[in-house]
């Protein structure tokens, strides 16, 4: 599946709860892990692949595939930490973001069974980042406003140029004419 980029409105939507954890959901999860490996990411939320549902997958350093369906963060630590984040939907941008160092999360696994997980370190960081995606929040929203604005402007400009390029290419194919 294609990973959507900043500027796509699906990324800004409040995702819907998963109604039933069935084979269709499990197939989506399997595809999302393929995407995660291909993109060398550590977390991917369903809205990033165009599915506006409350589901994300994580695979950090320990290589364990973790699935979170309809997650809820039920607790956060007092301690806050700054840590550099990136996002598959915002390539080549890295910013230090302040978040609680630990979280407790409740969710369903890929068999529809509920679990509770207490996480800290990188895992806690990724859970919070992916959880945000389900609420239409991107990590740049948690950076300084001028950083967010700069990144959004750059991506809008890039999207505009890509659209122009695609239109020009189509025109060339249609007319058979080539420009120098
Ligand atoms: Ni992300």
Image (tube, rainbow, N blue to C red):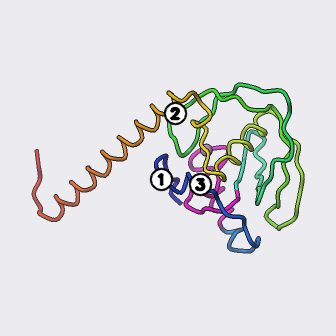
Crowding around mark 3 (Cα neighbors within 10 Å: few <14, some 14 to 19, many 20+) is some
Dots 2, 3 in contact, CB < 8 A? no
Residue 12, image x and y in percent? 56, 52
Mark with earlier residue (3, 1): 1
Q: Ligand 1 sits in which quadrant? A: top right
Q: CA distance from mark 3 to mark 1?
A: 18 Å
Q: CA distance from mark 1 to mark 2?
A: 15 Å
Residue 85 falls inside the magenta stretch: no
> Which residues are the magenta region?
28-55
Q: Which residue is mark 1?
A: 8
- Residue at 10%, 44% (x, y): give it: 180
Between marks 3 and 1 in the image, the one whose residue lies nearer the viewer = 1
Residue 35 is marked as 3
Q: Which residue is mark 2?
A: 148
- Tell whether 100 sits left or right of 156: right
- Residue at 58%, 56% (x, y): give it: 13
């Amino acid at each position: 599946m294609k990973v959507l980029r900043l500027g796509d409105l699906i990324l800004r939507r409040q995702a819907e709860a998963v109604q039933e954890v069935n084979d269709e959901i499990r197939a989506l999860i399997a595809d999302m892990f393929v995407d995660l490996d291909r993109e060398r990411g550590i977390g991917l939320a369903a809205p990033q692949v165009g599915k506006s549902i409350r589901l994300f997958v994580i695979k950090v350093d320990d290589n364990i595939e973790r699935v979170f369906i309809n997650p809820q963060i039920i607790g956060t630590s007092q301690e806050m930490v700054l840590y550099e984040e990136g996002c598959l939907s915002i390539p080549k941008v890295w910013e230090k973001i302040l978040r609680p160092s630990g979280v407790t999360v409740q969710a369903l696994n890929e068999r529809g069974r509920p679990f509770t997980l207490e996480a800290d370190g990188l895992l806690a960081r990724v859970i919070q980042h992916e959880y945000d995606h389900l609420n239409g929040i991107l990590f740049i929203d948690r950076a300084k406003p001028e950083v967010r604005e700069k990144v959004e402007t750059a991506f809008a400009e890039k999207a505009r140029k890509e659209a122009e390029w695609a239109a020009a290419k189509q025109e060339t194919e249609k007319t058979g004419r080539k420009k120098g």
